[in-house]
């Protein structure tokens, strides 16, 4: 592979978020420099995709603030425009009007690029009574039914309880229709991998699909034992703002019918906890001091309570003030730890980000993902940087120690693997070349520019296969 046409990433585009997101093929990082400075956290991508889908389901107009300028935003808005919606992007604000949406094609060249397209399936069924869903993309986290990289059967099953029916073709395309919808009482515990506890890869999407569809049913539904992650709470806030009656019950959430006409709504998305954790991990792994800024520090702090507890166990104290948080890394203070990602604890998306911190600590750490078993694709890239890792079927053992620059370009294959590879390269003396940066741009807004402002020596480049 040849790397050429390198250019510094020193300035972010004017009016961040107002332009389509374009990803360079590769990043060239000269590591070993402590990162220091201020960085602003963008909105939560998972919240964004749910509000987009729910707005389509309800046929309303919504003003969304704190929207991240990630490629997933642009791809989903392009698909929504093809359905007759209008969308105006101005900085971190998106005004999405779905009132004039009409039944239409979901384009596989769009839906298969991002995971968030999955929630267009219940939205289309709720709005138009029929959908032909060609499949979603995003990070491939296993081999599941219908050839998908993530499970989908739980969403079909929960929607069937509302009166929907489905037929799946050999290529994985799902044809769904709903001639007569009705209220339902789906129990999300039925899709848990552990009896009596919400665990595994199916409970989150089952919850979200049930809430999106229930908001359009002209009678009361109760979603029992829902997994109310922070993005799902943003979804509920939007439903209430749009005129849907939502009540929390002893064992679930009651969604009371659909208003005669969904009212225009305004919402501000939660600051992204995983992006904030990324910058905190940058401070720890490079021995720097990063100030994480947000207009909603209390919301972010509450959403990160499990991840903050992990950083504390690893020896990275995080201080909070009215503008956000400060993380200051000191290798002498870092400690090994065992960290387990669970649905209602440290989140699976943040789990890989702790690994570069563990590599700086003397001793042996363990990471275990109880949501997506085997989500350790980043381990190979870290090994190429000299990390000493032992990978088992359900855990990754991390031995602290020095890293070295890789002899060949690093090739992470998903969003968190790309972020972890960047963090490790920043902590490694010497030059690293990282390809697959399109994965970064699905999950992080202007990451190379933000890194540069923190003092990282980063260049964008074009990679050409030899």
Image (tube, helix red, strand yellow):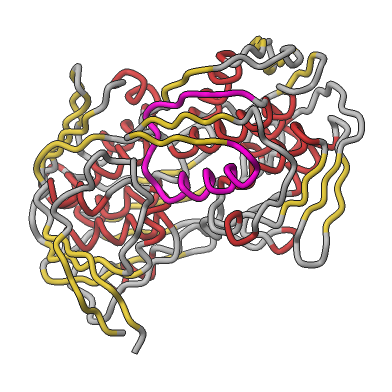
- Numbered circles on residues, count: 0
Task: Tell me where residue 63 appears, x and y as whole percent.
Answer: 47, 24
Q: Residue furthest right?
A: 179
Nearer to the camera, 64 or 371: 64
**Residue 331 in sight in this render:** no
Position of residue 394 in the picture relative to residue 396 (left or right): right
Q: Which residues are magenta?
A: 60-85
> Residue 35's x, y, as percent?
11, 48
> Viewed as shown, does residue 325 lie left or right of 463?
left
Q: Quadrant of residue 379?
A: bottom left
Which residue is located at x 39 percent, y 44 percent? 350
- Answer above or below: position of 212 versus 104: above
Instruction: Looking at the picture, tell me which residue is in the foreground, 77 or 398.
Output: 77
Q: Quadrant of the C terminus?
A: bottom left
| Residue at x-position 36% and y-position 71% | 411
Q: Quick one: which residue is furthest to the bottom in this view?
A: 466
Q: Is residue 21 magenta?
A: no
């Amino acid at each position: 592979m040849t790397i050429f046409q390198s250019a510094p990433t020193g300035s972010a585009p004017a009016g961040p978020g107002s332009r389509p997101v374009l990803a360079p093929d590769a990043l060239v990082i000269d590591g070993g420099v402590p990162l220091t400075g201020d960085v602003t956290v963008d909105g939560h991508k998972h919240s964004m995709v749910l509000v987009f889908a729910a707005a389509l389901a309800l046929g309303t107009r919504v003003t969304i603030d704190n929207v991240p300028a990630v490629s997933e935003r642009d791809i989903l808005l392009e698909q929504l425009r093809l359905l007759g919606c209008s969308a105006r992007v101005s900085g971190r604000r998106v005004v999405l009007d779905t009132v004039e949406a009409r039944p239409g094609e979901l384009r596989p060249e769009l839906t298969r690029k991002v995971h968030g397209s999955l929630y267009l399936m219940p939205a289309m069924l709720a709005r138009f009574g029929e959908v032909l869903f060609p499949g979603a993309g995003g990070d491939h986290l296993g081999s599941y039914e219908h050839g998908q990289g993530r499970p989908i059967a739980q969403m079909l099953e929960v929607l069937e309880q509302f009166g929907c029916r489905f037929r799946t073709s050999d290529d994985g395309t799902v044809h769904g229709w709903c001639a007569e919808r009705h209220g339902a009482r789906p129990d999300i515990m039925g899709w848990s991998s552990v009896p009596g506890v919400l665990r595994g890869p199916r409970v989150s999407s089952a919850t979200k699909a049930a809430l999106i569809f229930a908001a359009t049913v002209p009678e009361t539904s109760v979603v029992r034992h829902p997994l109310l992650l922070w993005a799902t709470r943003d979804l509920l806030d939007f439903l209430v703002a749009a005129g849907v009656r939502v009540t929390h019950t002893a064992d679930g959430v009651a969604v009371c019918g659909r208003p005669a006409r969904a009212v225009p709504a305004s919402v501000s998305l939660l600051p992204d906890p995983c992006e904030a954790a990324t910058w905190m991990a940058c401070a720890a792994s490079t021995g720097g001091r990063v100030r994480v800024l947000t207009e909603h520090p209390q919301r972010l702090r509450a959403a990160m309570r499990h991840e903050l507890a992990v950083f504390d166990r690893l020896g990275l104290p995080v201080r909070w003030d009215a503008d956000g948080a400060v993380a200051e890394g000191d290798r002498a203070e870092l400690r090994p730890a065992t960290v387990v990602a669970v649905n209602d604890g440290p989140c699976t998306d943040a789990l890989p980000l702790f690994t570069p911190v563990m590599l700086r600590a003397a001793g042996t750490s363990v990471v275990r993902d109880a949501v997506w078993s085997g989500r350790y694709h980043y381990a190979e890239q870290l090994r190429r940087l000299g990390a000493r890792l032992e990978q088992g079927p359900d855990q990754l053992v991390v031995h602290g120690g020095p890293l070295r620059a890789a002899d060949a370009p690093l090739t992470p294959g998903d969003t968190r693997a790309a972020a972890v590879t960047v963090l490790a390269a920043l902590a490694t003396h010497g030059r690293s070349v990282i390809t697959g940066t399109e994965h970064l741009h699905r999950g992080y807004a202007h990451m190379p520019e933000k890194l540069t402002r923190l003092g990282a020596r980063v260049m964008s480049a074009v990679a050409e296969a030899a």
